[in-house]
Image (spheres, rainbow, N blue to C red):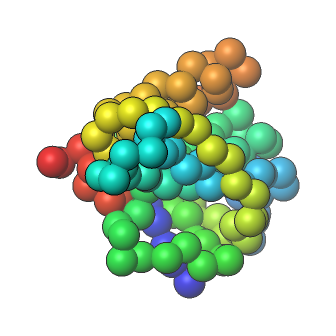
Amino acid sequence: MLSIGCMVENEDYDRLKSIIKDETIPRYFTYTLTVKDASKAKDSSSIKVYVIELTSANLAIGFTLPNIKKLAKELLVAFTASPDAQRPNPEYLRFKCEFSDNQRKANYDGSNLEKLEYIGTWLEKTFEKKTVMFYLFDYQGIGNT
C-alpha cells in the first residue's frame, strides 16, 4: 500500500482530527486528472494529478507521483500540521482510502511545470468557489526542474 504525507494548516488539521475515526473518513471522492498537450506534437508530454476530495472536511488534496510509482487501489494518507503552542508534536492523522478508476482530462500546451501550475491554479479556484481548502503536493518533483 502506498503512503503519502500531507502538511495542512492547523484549522484543517483540527477539522480532520474530529472526523477521522479508525483510519476512515465518512465521505470522500477520488479521481485521476491527466493534463496533456492540446497539440499532438511528437515531444508532447502529460502529467497525472491524483485528487482526493474530502467532502466531510471541506478539504481536497491533489498530488503527483514519481513516474516509477504506480498508484495502487488502496492508499494511506497521513496528515500533520506545524507544531504550535497548543500542539508541540502533532500526531499523524491516518486515513485509508480506495482510489477509484474515475478519470478526468484537461489540455494545456507547455512544459510539465506549466501544466502543473495551470491545473493547480484551476483546481484551487474551483474548490475556492465551493469554500473547500485545496492542497497540491508535488511528489514527482516537477517544480524542482
Q: Nearer the viewer, residue 68 or 37?
A: 37
The residue shown at (30%, 52%) is 43
| Residue 56 in picture, x, y percent from top left | 79, 42
Residue lying at the far left in this picture: please name it: 145
Q: Taking the image as drawn, is residue 139 in sight? A: yes
Compared with 83, 107 (above or below) is above
Q: How many numbered markers are drawn?
A: 0
Can residue 17 be seen from the camera position used here?
no
Lateral position of residue 70 relative to residue 53, left or right = left
Q: Residue furthest right?
A: 26
Q: Residue at x 75, y 57 (%)?
A: 102
- Return the residue found at the far top: 129
Q: Position of residue 9 (x, y in %)?
A: 46, 35
Q: Is residue 133 above or below residue 103?
A: above
Quadrant housing the N terminus:
bottom right
| Residue in view at x 55 percent, y 50 percent | 34
Q: Quadrant of residue 31?
A: bottom right
